[in-house]
Amino acid sequence: MNKPLTKKRSLVFFLVPNFSMLPFSAAIETLRIANRMLGYEAYTWRLSSTDGTQVLSSSGIGLEVNTSLADERKFLGGENRPSMVLVCSGIYVEDFNNKSVNAWLREVYNRGVSVGSLCTGAHVLASAGLLTGKRCAIHWENLPGFAESFPQVDVYADLYEIDSNIYTCAGSTASLDMMLNLIDQDFGENLVNRVCEQALTDRVRGRMIVSACHFAPVLACRMPRSCRSSS
């Protein structure tokens, strides 16, 4: 079935200090290429931070943002309301604990806006209480600590997970795969293939491919929690 050609999504990338550039840029570029292939801006985005000021990535590169948390709260009730909010973080995410951000994320979710995360951003979503009883993905290096801190969350070492309207990915190049899934939902396989050609990606990876290949030691974290606690 053909997807509607005029479909549009607006995304907010919320930047946490020390966010990882690779998953952030992979997500943005995937959407940019999709727009180019479509010939119109099906995907628009803006960058946000807590106070609206520049945010430094883990590589030391700072990015200027478009909005503050206060701006985004106002936008929720008007024409600038986003379709999706993605939390972008990286190393030291455990040090980020902002009650205002948590409250905003809950408000976003409760108003029907899709929420998600790149790399370690699932930690922020879990802190906001949005992942209780949900499946999520996080970078394999952070998975054991995350599972211990949030035992009520079903966390996996997959490329990405989609549970209802919550999208999480493991970071690095996995954000490309999650964005390709989003594009497939909106426009179908043909556009996904054209984006892959432009990005020099020879295939679309399934969401569970990480667990199936290189990171076998992490698989122990996929056992039922009752088994893990007794081992």
Image (tube, rainbow, N blue to C red):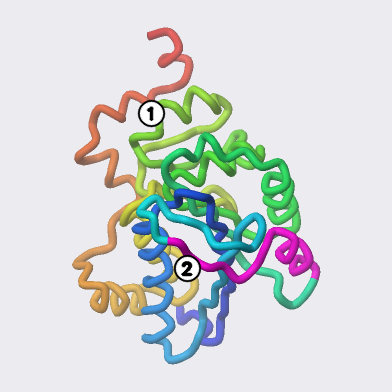
> Does residue 228 belong to the magenta stretch?
no
Residue located beneath label 2 in the image:
185
Q: Which residue is drawn at the image coordinates 50% and 85% (left, top)?
A: 41
Q: Is residue 112 above or below residue 227?
A: below
Q: Nearer the viewer, mark 1 or mark 2?
A: 1
Q: CA distance from mark 1 to mark 2?
A: 27 Å
- Can you identify the residue that label 1 sits on? 222
**Which comes before the other along the chain, label 1 or label 2?**
2
Quadrant of the image for the C terminus? top left
Amino acid marked by disc 1 = Arg
* Whole-percent x, y for residue 141 in the image: 34, 35
Could you say whether the residue bearing mark 2 is in a helix, strand or loop? Answer: helix
The image shows residue 26 at horizontal and vertical percentages of 36, 64
Q: Residue at x 51, y 43 (%)?
A: 122
Q: As drawn, which residue projects farthest toward the bottom?
A: 39
69 inside magenta stretch: yes
Is residue 41 toward the left or the right of residue 125 in the image? left
Instruction: Tell me the amino acid under the disc marked 2.
Output: Gln
Q: At 66% from the left edge and 42% from the top edge, which residue is drawn?
A: 98
Residue 140 lies left or right of residue 105; in this view the side is left
Q: Are marks 1 and 2 in contact (CB under 8 Å)?
A: no
